[in-house]
Every structure is written in structure tokens, then in C-alpha cells.
Image: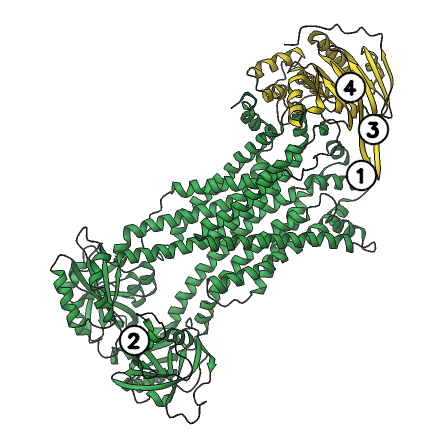
Chain colours: A yellow, B green
Amino acid sequence: MLVASNLQKEYPSGAGTLAVLKQVSFTIPQGSLVAIVGPSGSGKTTLLGLLAGLDVPSSGTVSLDGVELNRLTEDERARLRGEKVGFIFQTFQLIPTLTALENVQVPLELRGDFGAPERAKMLLEHVGLGDRMDHFPSQLSGGEQQRVAIARAFSNSPKILFADEPTGNLDGVTGAKIVELLESLNKSSGSTVVIVTHDLTLAERAGRIIRLRDGDIVEDRTTSATPPVPASSTAR
Amino acid sequence: MTARWRWIPSLAWRESRTARRRLLLYMSSISLGVGALVAIDSIADNVSAAVRLQSRSVMGGDVSFTSDTRYPDSLKALLDSLARTGPTMATVVTFTSMAYAPRTQITRLAQVRAVGPTYPPYGAVTSEPANLWGELQKRPAALVSPSTLISLDANVGDTLSIGFSQFIIIGTTNSVPGDPGLASAIGPRVFIAEQYVASTQLLGFGSRASFETLVRLPDGVQSPQWVEPIRARFRAANIRVRTVVQQEENMTEAISRLADFLGIVGMIALLLGGIGVASGVNAFMNRKIDTVAVLRCLGATGSQVLAIYVTQAALMGLAGAAIGAAIGVAIQFALPVALEGTLPLDVTVQIVPKAIGVGLAIGVWVALVFSLRPLLALRRVSPLQALRRDAEALEHQRRRDIPSHLVNIALVASVVVLAISRTDNWRRGILVALGIGVSLLLLWGSATLLSHLARRLVAQRLPYLLRQGVANLYRPANQTRSVILALGFGAFLVSTLYLVQANLLRQFEVSAQAARGNLVFFDVQDDQRVAIDSIVQATGEQAVSATPLVTMKLKSINGQALDVWGAAHALPRRNWAFNREYRSTYRDTVVVTEQITAGKWFGGSGTDTLSEMSLEQGLATDLAVSLGDTLTWDVQGVPVAARLTSLREVNWGRFEPNFFAVFQSKALSTAPKMFVLVAAISSDTVIARIQRNVVLRFPNASSVDLSLLRATVLEIIGRITLAVRFLALFSLAMAVPVLFSAVAATRRDRLREGVLLKTLGATRAQIGRILLAEYALLGMLGAFTGMLLSFVGAWALVTFVFDGQFSPALLPAFLIAGVMMTLAVAIGMATGREVFRETPMAALRDT
């Protein structure tokens, strides 16, 4: 479960400060698929950064699985990310010098898992890239790169997965396939998935939509999409 | 290793995949520095090993007794009695004489070594044909050095006249213990048996010869202990006593001093490489920010990230150092070939694992410690950078960042420890480290000043392109400091090296060029002078000068015996200046090779009844005498007193007769004397004719053809100059990767900026001019600040280390600065070529 309480993020601006997020609070139960939407500058990415422990709030707290992120040091937050958090980025953010397989291995290797290569192979086969494992990112299409990124995000069986505009750099058809893949992994693994997006069609496929404007939550509603079934099983 | 570290080495290796070449290029900045250190240490080790093995055969024995006169009978008897207790004694008399080959009618000044039957006590003489050494004792035969045969145009089997005696040349010598290769390369050598010296009639009154007895001690007897009880008696008779231990110490000390100097040069080269590494790794780090941000998102801790990139830097540092070690070994093997014949001993070139190990270790350490500073910043890469590019790439550095402070301390400590280990003297090491630190601070300061000035002075009325170029010097992410530091330090190193060597060589070159005559006759007796003069004049040429030589010894100072005077003035008990035999002259004018530094030249004191004399200033210090003192000399039995009225600085390097003591003519004109005649002869054939005619009439009058000697000296200077140019080129070559690394640090910013300008409509030529303005300014300031610093550095080295007089060689220094500036512009423009190549779209998408 992810709990955000009174999250406030301010940046110095001229003589004063600029509040990018204003007292934002919500709770996301384990296994949910949630979309955070809003126009540019509404604070979506800032919120994602705070929820994932990439940044610290000016005030308020984020608690993941009962662990309050503010109380952790940067390295402790990094370890927590390695254990419980997965990421998917708009620009894929694969490490260009590593092959697809090696990219998927990275989170496991940083944790020191013995079976990193085997699990990475299994995940790549699961996302349909069994024959592209030894390719470098530059040798893959955008859709393929995003599938590698999804395999990487699920490699450490995360409790929660954050996706920042996962279809933003893809054409419509490829984007749809990526969303289907995310949904299926969400269902099969029981991971919470938080998607930040502009794409309202994509957002409507989530069970819940949180809408931001100027740093405030202006809407928090469930959708007609089938709510994900909280699963006790994990992707492993 | 805990589980979290298990994969780090392999992840580091895989992640470096596409960056290895680039990282290796940055790390190659240290290669030449490591190469220099490995080469210097290896050669020093090889030469020292050769000294240890061969010092006995270089000296010729365990103990040597050398005198300028024959030994007194009492000491001869002492040596004979000692010889009966076990040691082997061997004698050699060395003197210079004209060697004349009647068949070719060529005459050359040669060193004659007349050897006793047991010479040499150590080692063996090799000759061509073989096994001829023993023949010398059986008949009037001579073995000569190959250079003697060449200079006389003679063959084996020819007759050789030495003084009033004739010898058959039976072969040539390849190596003779006690006769170093360099000396025999310069001067021709003739070996005869000692028993035939008398027949040459050359060792008469006033002749210069050296009488040496070499002792081979029985096994197990140590030379210092053996010689100690008798040393004082020989010294009292002005006989120099040397042991093989001293010889070894002297030789290894000279080698280690030379190695120290070159080691400092190598170390500075390595530090310059370190600056290159730091700049290069900084550039590398900038390229890695995105990857690090992703790694941080995926759970990498700061220390894991640091470990990944430190591993990469260490591996590439090791590769850079290994390339350097290979270069060093190549130099080690190439150098003896280049110096063949000039080394005093046979140096066996062998790989020295310790030198390679030390070179590698120092190289990797320098690469690591200089990499760590920029790499530490990777710990501060925000994972937010993976989400959005506008996030501040680096979190602010905490003021109390202990690792950063530790790295700074390690950097300073490394420089100090390296300097101390290279100079073998902590005080000198700290001074060298301070010098390096001050130079870097000055360069840093001038770069900061340039940045400020650029901000102040960039005026709207400047043309746009120039304004852009100048503005690049102070904008955020400018490269002013890194380029000026690398370039300035490089220029400083190259220019200092060149200036020091040029100053040292200049003295020799000037003296070789400036001699007034080219044919010099030594040891000309008073009654031979007119005859030789007429032989010269008969060829239509002129004698330039005739300098009288009077042999004398110092007897007393201000009426006090020398030991009393020495004790009163706290002079060393064995003062060389008290004991030596002086060859002085008299004249009434100052010559071009000397300068009065105190007092007045003769005739200044007016009514003095005593004759006046002038002393070389160093000798006056050693004798503790000052102007007005009276020195009494023993001129072949006759006491001659003279008042010291002037001191002179003498340029001993000139090919002119120079003297410690010069007297007023009236003091010595009636004393027994010899002359040095100098003639200026226009052609080689006339020189040969005069030499032949003089030696036929006066076999004791030696002459030397200075044009030959000058050519030899100039050739040696030429060789050294070539070595210096090689060293300068070597250093310049080293500046290339360093500059490349410095410029690379801001390559991405330049690329982005250039492409943005292109998008806004700038042409390639306009962007080129902006880059040109920026790099020309950087190059000019860096190179010229380095050049100015090099004047200070070279002055300090020449004045305090080499005891010389510094004169700034402006033209070469400007030339070096110009080359460095051009290099900076060329590298800057070459790095900027991507701006020309990239389309605006592609670049904007990527950056």
C-alpha cells in the first residue's frame, strides 16, 4: 500500500518559493492500477518522483508498505527501490551500453541475486523478446525498447511500478500493445501500477484516475474499467 | 564481498563497453609519463648493475694510487713490501704526445698509456687480432684504439713514432679495463709497454704525466680496510688514493643524481597526465549522468555507482599505464643503441620488473586519484534526471563532504610523496611539490582572471561572432579553467625542459665556436718557440698568441705557512688549493675569457714594490685570501711573492688557455717556462703539414687540431640537442591527449550550443569563427602563462641546481608557446567538428 499525506513540494523562485504540489493526500491499495493525469506543469512528474522516493517533499510524508520514505537516507531509499519499486519511462531509459538481457538483469544484479540471467531471460521471453536478448537498445524499435523496459521494471517483482508516460514516444498501435502488456503483468503479479499520462484513453483503462491541476488534486475517481484483482501471487 | 557487490565488477565491465576507447584515450594521458618513469628507472637499474659488476674493471683494480710525479722512493718501497704480502700491483704511466705515422705523414695528439707487465689486474684486454696484449712487453710494439688508426690513416703493421722512439702497430684494442669508452672515442689511445717510455724521451722536465699503481687485493680483503693504514702517507705525498668502493659510490651517485633529475621531469609529465585524466574523466562523467540516474532509479546506492565507475577508471588506468610501461621498456632498449660507444661500461639491457611494477602502480594510482575527484560527483546524480532532463543533474555538494576532502588530501599527499621519492630528499621534494602547486595556482588564477575580464570586457560593439567566442569563456559550463590548466602546465613543462637544456648546452656551443685559433701547441720550450713560429710563418700563416706557462706551488700567505694559515681560517686540512701544482702565466692585459669581479687589474696600485697578481675568484675563496694579501710561490725552487690586486671570473669552458693565477709580467718573465702557441690556420692540409714539420723537429711539442676537437664536441652537442628535441617532442606529444581530454569535458555543451545556433540560422563558417575565437584566446593565455612560468622554473633550475647563468631563449620559448596555442586551437576545432556534421534535428533529439 502507498500512502501520501499532505505532500507539499516547493522550489525557490526569485525572492520567494513556488509550490508545485500543495498538500496532496491519497492512498493506493496494493494491486491497484492508478492513472495520474493533468496538463503540463500540473505537478504529475513531481508527484511521481516523490512517491517513488526519487525526491523528498518539502513537507508531508510518503509511506510505502508502512515504511516512511522521508525517514530514509538517499541510499536507503535506493535500496528500497531496488527491492520494491519498478520504473517505466517515456524515453525508455535503457542503458545504451548494455544488451536487452543485461538491461533486465541490472536491478537483480544491484541486489546481488544469484539467478539474475535466468530470470531476465524468462521475463524477456514473457514480453515477446526471446529472440532479441543480445541486441543493444539502438538495435531495437521504440516498442521493443519499451518492452525491455517493462521486463526490467518487473524483474525485481516490485510491490509498485511507476510508469511515466509509457506510451508517450510510441505510435498508437504499439502504445496499445504496451498498455495490454502492463495490464496483464499487473494482473498476474499483483503489483500496484501507477501511470502518469496525458493520454485519456490510456487513463480510462486504469481502475482509478487522480487528476492534478496547479499542484492540487482536482479529481480522484474510480473508472468503469475492471478493477484489478488483488493477487497474493507475485510475478516470480 | 556481500551479495550487493557480487555483480559490480562484471556490471562495470559490461557498462564500459562502448566507452572503453574513449576512456582509454583519456587514460593515455598518463602513458608517456609512466613510460618516462619506467625507462628512467630501468636504465638507472641496468647501469647501476653494470657498475656493481664492472666497477673493478672500469677502475682497473681494487685500489688506485695516482700521482702527477714519480713516487718517492720510500713509497715505492712500501708498495713493494705490500706486494710481497699477497696483492698484485700493476703500473701504468699516462701522458699525451704527438703520434706520427711516417707512411701517411699524418700527426695526431694521442694519449699514450705505457703499461707494466701485470696490467690490467682485473678484466681482460680484447684486441683485434686477438691475444696480442702480451706482445707489448716483448718488443717495441703498440696497440692503438680504432680511432687512432682512422685519424692517422694508418694500418696494422705501420710504424708509429712517439717522441724519439718508434713502435710497430700490431693491432687495435676493443676494450681495455680502466679506459672508459667515451674517453677513448674522443681521444686517440696508444698502448705501449712501460719499459719503452724512457726511449721516447718524453717525460723530461715540465712534462705532464700521470703515474698510477693499481692493486688487486686477495679474495676476502676489503679495499677500504686495506688502504686505511697507508692512506695518510700517500696523501701527504700528493698521491691520490681511490678504492673500488669509492669508485662505485661515485658512479652510482652520479647515475642516481641524473636519474633523480629525469625522474622529476617524468613525474611532472605524469602529473600533467593526471590533469588530462581528471579533465577526461569529467567529460566521461558528464556523458554518464543519464545512465547513473537510471541506475539510481533501479536501486543502485551511491557507493555502488561509484564502485562501477572507479572500477572502469582503474581498469583503463591500468591499460594506460601498461601502454606507458611498454613505451618505457622500448625506450630502455633503444637508448643504449643510440648511445653506443659513449657509455663508460657495457650495459646489459634487462627488463627490470621492479621498475615496471613501480611505474604501473604509480600510473594506476595517479589515474585513480585524479579520476576520483570528478567521479565522486556521480554519487550526487539525482535519480530525478531519469524522469526529466531539466532536473538539476547534480545535487548540491554538501560542504562537509568527507570523501571529497579525503580525495583532495590524497591528491596533495600523492604529489608530495611522489616528489620526495623522486628527489630522494624530503626538503627538495617538498620544494618541487610546492613549485608545482604554485604553478598550478597561478594558472588557475590566470584562468579565473580571464573569465572575469571576459565578462567585464565583452562589449556590445565587438562583432557578434567574436563576442560569442569571448562570452564562452565565462558562461556556465565554460572550459576556461580546465583548458588553461592543462595547456599552461603542458607549455610550462615543455618550455622549462627546453630552456634548461638550451642554457646548459649554449655554454659549450659558444666555447666551441668562439676559439680564436684552431691549432694549439702545448709544452713548447722557450728555445723552441721561435722555431715553431717560423715553421708556421713558412706556410704563410700566423701564430695568434704565445702564452707562457710557469709551473709553481703555493708556499705561504701573508708570511704564514700554509698549515698555519689554513688552521687560522678554518680551512679543510687537505685543501686541494694548497697542494696542487699550478701552471700560471704572466701578462699585462685581461683576456676575453675572464672578467674582473673585484679589485683592479695590474698597474692600479702605483707605487707598490711587490709584483701584482690576480686570482680566479673561486680559488681565492678556497684559500681564504682577499685583495691586498701577499702570496708567496715556489717557482721551481725560487720564492716569488706577489700581492693579490684583483679577482677574476673565468669561463673555463672556452678553448683558450685559462689560469687560476695570472701574474704581472715583471714577476715571472725570467722564470723557467714553457709556452702554449695558438695559430689560426686556414686549411686542414696546412695544419697537417705544420704538425708534421714540428713533430719531426721537436717530438716533445704536442699540438692539437682544434677544428677536429671542435667538430667532435659539436657532434656530441648535436647528439644531445637531438635528444633534447626528442624530449620536447615527447612532451608535446603528451600534451595532445591531455588537451583532448580538457576540451572533451565541455564537448557536449559546445555541441548543443552549436546545433542550437545552426537551428537559429548560423552558418558553419560562423560557428567555426566563434570556436576559433574561444580556442585562440584560451590557447594564447594558457600557452603564454605557461611560457612565463617556464622562465621562472628554468631560471631556478639553472641557477640553483646547475650553478649556471640563465639567459632566456626567447625565440624558442615563443615558438613552443605558439605550437601549444596552435595545438589547442586545432584540437578545439577538431572536437567541434561534430557541430558541423550533425543535423540540427538529430542533435536536438539526442542532447
Question: Residue B576, percent across and down?
Answer: 32, 71
Q: CA distance from mark 2 to mark 4?
A: 100 Å
Task: Determine whether A228 is above or below A67 in the image.
Answer: above
| Residue type (three-letter) at the residue carrying disc 3 | Val
Q: Are marks 2 and 3 on the same chain?
A: no
> What residue is shown with label 3?
A20
Question: Residue B540, percent across and down?
Answer: 38, 84
Specify the label residue B449 is tagged with: none
Q: Chain of mark 2?
A: B
Q: CA distance from mark 2 to mark 3?
A: 96 Å
Foreground residue, B521 or B687? B521
| Residue type (three-letter) at the residue carrying disc 1 | Thr
Q: Residues within 10 Å of mark 4 (few under 14, many from 20)?
A: many
Q: Are marks 4 and 3 on the same chain?
A: yes
Q: Are marks 3 and 1 on the same chain?
A: no
Contact between marks 2 and 4 (CB within 8 A): the answer is no
> What residue is shown with label 4?
A4
| Residue type (three-letter) at the residue carrying disc 2 | Asp
Q: From where the camera sits, is residue A127 visible?
A: yes
